[in-house]
Image (cartoon, helix red, strand yellow):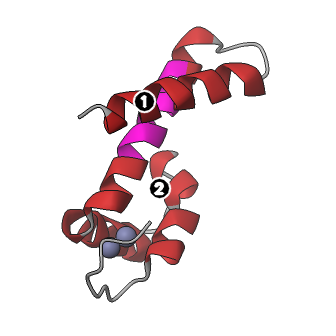
Amino acid sequence: MSCGNHHDVPCVEVLSLMWVYIDDEIDDGHRIEVTVHLQECPPCADHFTAEQIVQARIRKCCTETQTPQELRARIVEQIQAALRSN
Ligand SMILES: [Zn+2]
Ligand SMILES: [Zn+2]
């Protein structure tokens, strides 16, 4: 999970902020840091895109029930396969 470029905000920090960013619970300062990082770091951008798709699909399929880990794992697999085939 590294593109080899230098980043002001390291990838691990960006990835640790991923869920609050996707859930839109991030503060403005961090939001800007993450957005800038994603523009200069394709591996992190791919990761975020995949997670956003997973989140959207889970919300759509199971709004009431608790999030089934199995379903989540399956969707992640499908997306990762799709990303690899690009
Ligand atoms: Zn990165
Ligand atoms: Zn990078």
Which amino acid does the dot numbered 2 rest on? Tyr
Is ligand 1 less than 8 Å from the beta carbon at label 2?
A: no
Task: Say few, some or many: other residues with alpha carbon within 10 Å of mark 2 (under 14 / 14 to 19 / 20 or more).
Answer: many
Q: Is residue 72 left or right of residue 24?
A: right
> Percent from the top left, x then y, of residue 26?
50, 62
The residue lying at 34 percent from left, 59 percent from top is 43
In the rendered image, the vertical position of residue 42 relative to residue 36, given as above or below: above
In the image, is residue 21 above or below residue 13? above
Mark 1 Cα-neighbour bin, 10 Å: few <14, some 14–19, many ≥20: few
> Mark 1 sits on what residue?
81
**Start-end of magenta stretch:** 48-57
Closest to the observer, 29 or 54? 54
In the image, what residue occupies the spot 26% across and 60% down? 42
User: Could you say whether the residue bearing mark 2 is in a helix, strand or loop?
Assistant: helix
Cα separation, mark 2 vs mark 1, equals: 24 Å
Question: What amino acid does circle 1 point to?
Answer: Ala
- Asked if residue 46 is positioned above or below residue 33 in the image, the reply reads above
Q: Is residue 78 magenta?
A: no
Question: Would you name the residue on which mark 2 appears?
Answer: 21
Ligand 1 quarter of the rendering: bottom left
* Residue 6 % position (x, y): 28, 88
Q: Nearer the viewer, residue 85 or 48?
A: 85
Quarter of the image with the C terminus in it: top left
Q: Can you see residue 68?
A: no
Instruction: Give the mark toward the camera: 2 or 1.
Output: 1
Expressed as whole percent of the image width and height from the top left, the position of residue 53 reads 42, 30
Q: Quadrant of the N terminus?
A: bottom left
**Residue in view at x 28 percent, y 63 percent:** 38
Does the magenta stretch mainly form a helix, a strand or a loop? helix
